[in-house]
Image (spheres, coloured by chain):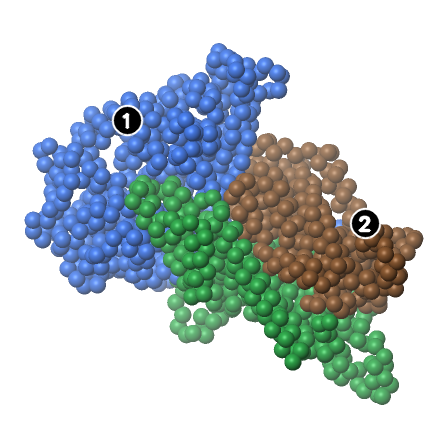
Amino acid sequence: MARFRYLGRKVAWLAITLYGVVTFNFVLFHVLPGNPVRLLARSGHLTPQAVAAITKVYGLNHPLIVQYAIYLGDLLRGQLGLSYTYREPVGTLLGQYLGNTVLLLAGATLLTIVLGVLFGVIAANRRGGRYDSLTVTTSVIGWSLPTFWTGLILVFLLGVWLHAFPIFGSQTPNAVYTSPWLRYEDIAAHLFLPTLTLVIVNIAQFVLVARASVIEVLAEDFMLTARAKGLARRRILWRHAVRNAMLPIVTSSALLVGLVVSGAIEVETVFSWPGMGLLVYNSVLNRDYPVIEGAFLVFAIVVLLVNFASDLLYQVLDPRVREA
Amino acid sequence: MLVGISRRDLLKRASLLAMAVPGLATVLDACASAVPTAKAKILRVGWTIEPDTMNPLTTYSTEAVEVLQLIYDQLMHYDLDLKPQPGLATSWTYSPDGKSITYTLRSATWHDGKPFTSADAKFTFDLIKSTKTSAYYQWVTSMVSTEAPNATTLVLHFSQPQAFNPGLAVPIIPQHIWTGMDATKIQKFVNSHPVGTGPYKFVNWIKGTSIEVERNESWWGTKPAAAKVSWTLFQNEDVMAQSLKTGSVDICPEIPPTIWRGLSSAPNLKTVSLPSFSFHHIGINVSDNPKSGGNPLLKDRNVRLALSYAVDRQQLVNVALAGLGTPGSALLPAGFGEWHLDIPESQQFNANPAKAEALLTAAGYIDRNGSGVRTSKGGKPLSFRLIAIQSTSVDVAAAQLFRNACAKVGIQLKLTLLDANSLGNTVYNAQAPNWDIFVWGWDAGVYDPDYMLGIPLCNQIGANNDVYYCNRHYDQLYNEQSVTIDHAARLALVHQAQQYYYDDAAYIIMWYQDKLQGYRTDTWQGWQPVNGGMVLNFTRDNYLKVRPA
Amino acid sequence: MVRPIITSGHVPGPDDGLVPAVAAEPAQRGQLRNVWGYVWHDRLGRVGVVAFVLVVIIAVAGPLLFPFNQAAVSSTSAGLLLPPSGQYWLGTDELGRDVFREFLAAAHVSLIVGLAATAISMILGAAIGIVAGYYGRWIDNTLMRLTDFFLVLPQIPLVIALAAFFGQSLGIIILVIGMTGWPTTARIVRSQTLSLRERQFITRVRSLGTPDSRILRVHILPNVMPLIFANTVLVIGGAILAEATLSFLGLGDPVQVSWGTMLHFAFDSGAIGRGAWWYFVPPGIGIVIVVLAFTLTGHAIDQALNPRLRGSR
């Protein structure tokens, strides 16, 4: 019973935070000077009738409160407004770019977690050795790298200089594929550098967390008992140590999603990967407020949901932790 | 043993990189892909700005017009010499008083198979006139009525003689698709599959990546050689230039100066620098509106002249444009040929800081307190707010140079960089424009003096007139030239209008930038240079005339 | 948006305040000397401190010895993007200016922004964390919800919004980084405050009727300070990274040179494709060194304060 009440309270707080984010988003972008009319004012002869029509289409003629109500109503129906630059629904636009971002982020997140934990556990196993110090050092350096700069360097070294990988887009432009496998291969080649960038920068967290957790567990008394009983070291490692390291890893994963999502903008910009991050970057340049608003709302929701899920997972994994 | 990171390690890595770089150029050349052995079929264009929409009546983007001009035909088109040629109209005649134009139309088919008739043409002009919401409305403001006496004739009646023939600007849209739409519906109409009569049919638009069109086999004109045309969007000019080098695209119509220079020695590539129809300028708020927040000292012509004399336009070109442009003077860019007013250098208000200082001193602006900034007799300092668009790097560079130059003659400029939207909002706040000086630019909407000359009109306040200039004499000159059909007479009037506006110094035109383009020589041949650009220009003929190399 | 601080295993958990995973020892006299001693003897810590000192010297002395003249643009197009030479140690940028001097001036700006933003986020974070941890119940709940909200606040739209009103400037960058950086600090401080509150000497003092303000000032604050200090050093690294990112995306102050804006203009002007490594490699390396310096030093200080963490070495 207490479990459900706890869950219910968590969900309620989630909803309130979501509502807060939505409102803040709205307020932020609707008190800003500038609207689609001004945006277009430069480009040509904007007649009063055009101004009126555009104003009507964007609902700008209503007082702010009414616009807010319309905004909320639209949101519940999945409508995110109309883009200033494309004059198309924001939802459609995001949808067109979303698939690419998911492809990039899912791959990068998975690789980061798997490789990070792997390296961290091995480093913990060989604590004090050369492998350990190398891993820790490179991880810390990796964490200090700006994401976009890492991308730039990879573009320069592997793309421009060595010509080993393509440096922009998701596919070779105007390519004709004789089989779907060739197409996947092309996409994979284009995916390599952006994914590598994200992994290099974010892996440190997992390496260090995994390493520290495993070291702590290895030093615990029960491990001593297990070793005394004659259990193989590797079995101890993987069965017990890693399982206990899961908690901080789960929390880190939640944080990772937030990082990766924001890192997406940087990476997609540098590599021209046609995803939501790139859409946001261009919308930032063009001050296309509805798109920025919609994209960041989606980002915030994803991060909130992932954090929420990890909170719950944390509860499940560690019975010791309960809200007082 | 824990390994630390030493500075020496990092420096060593950096120097390794340094040694590798001289080989970069040769490596890049070797990297250029092999020439495709098959004959080129797709004409691939690379650019960095995407169209905004496929709806010709709501678009305000040059890139959109570029794509749409292959999908939609006009009554007449510009050829490679920028002379009018038959389009959907095989011939056209003016009535003796110049107030009516009769077009003889050919037969054609819409991309969806339906036949094109004069009803569609009449519908197009009527719709633009009645809804008043598209950029094309400016060409039909004095249109009074339209007639389609038979399926192949269209007559347009105007209230005054038309020096500029609107058949050269307006795309003809199909009545059976656009019928019944009012202004709001037109704004909302996405037109995701545009249907026209043009030489190419729309295939798809993958947002953020590319647009593709394919040849219209039932087009009325000579079939173009390219079976498909595609425009690939690049996020970054650097990457776009790389792709041109490696052969992923055939032509890039807008390359920034430093990158363009870097392409000049690449194999199988030709770079061209063409005069453009655009300028970048410094605009001064000369509004007479009592609510204007502009500094009143700017209403003094002496101050404006001093600002103009303070700056060296050649230096601006050298630094901001890497030398690839022409120092600016008159309102119409040099690319307009004879229409451009050639002001002798000795008579230009340019690069003469001594003259600027003399003017200011004579008008009573002296540095009265040793601060380096001159003040008026009433004690008001010559200190103005300068705004520019942050993302336009050439403007940012120019603004900084301008500020430095003015400081030398005792005028202080406080620079703030804004995004394009905010700047537009600030400048075009017609009720109470609260700014002093800006750095911005203009592109000509059509290949006719009318558009640019029409910017500083009194009736354009609230529309295009960004400096709120209003002068009856200038308006008179403009009105006269826009109804003068006789070429020589019109030319003289256009020159007079430019001289008058130049003398008033509300604009300080910094430069006419060159249109820097690059194209491969091993895929398509027959590219003709045209003022304003081989592509991304008022003429589409290069698309239609190139053949596989 | 802000990278969470890695403290070799202690990742801020979801219910951090309620079950402090690692509690710090209460402050004692002479702890400062102990901390210093530990840091200096720790290999990585020493590297961090040395780098830290070097960075400070370069950022302060550099611009004084080699001043950068922003207006010294080349007057011809031949001087743009030149490779390193005897005259220009790091070549020239796209406006023909000396990259070496620009780099030093940018170091100065990047550090100032990092420090100022960190100051804001530390003061806010510490204040909110202490108040939430000490007073508990509904104050704690509300403040924690506020923290959650600011945690998901993205920096980019905030910068755009403020810049639309006030024009892009360093002040806005500092403000936004500060406003989005305090939640993590608040959580950590709150956790520490909570565990402190339950300690015997605090309970005793409270039962004596001592006013809260005095308890906070005399007992809680000094015990939280070391943690705040360690955290500060780590946060600076994140702030510098954040400034670099925002400036790279074009949201910085283009009239000022920072490492981020240098990279922005390098990217924009085609320096990558032209192979002008002297323009885009040094600022990145500068950022890495500075962030490493702060991270390693802070990391070591953190371990000095929490002996439990030392075990994981």
Quarter of the rendering containing residue A322:
bottom right
Circle 1: residue type = Asp
Palette colour of chain B = blue
Palette colour of chain C = brown
Q: Which residue position is annotated with label 1?
A: B475
**Which residue sits at x=44%, y=60%?**
A80
Q: Position of residue B128 (x, y in %)?
A: 23, 47
Q: Which residue position is annotated with label 2?
A: C50
Pick whichever, C207 or B147, lies toward us.
C207
B7 sits left or right of A195 in the view: right
Q: Position of residue C265 (x, y in %)?
A: 56, 44
What is the chain identity of the residue bearing mark 2?
C
Quarter of the rendering containing residue B83:
top left
Q: Residues within 10 Å of mark 2 (few under 14, many from 20)?
A: some
Pick whichever, B524 or B197, lies toward us.
B197
| Label 1: which secondary element | helix
Who's green, chain-wise? A
Circle 2: residue type = Val
Q: Position of residue B49 (x, y in %)?
A: 42, 50
Label tally:
2
**Which residue sits at x=62%, y=68%?**
A307
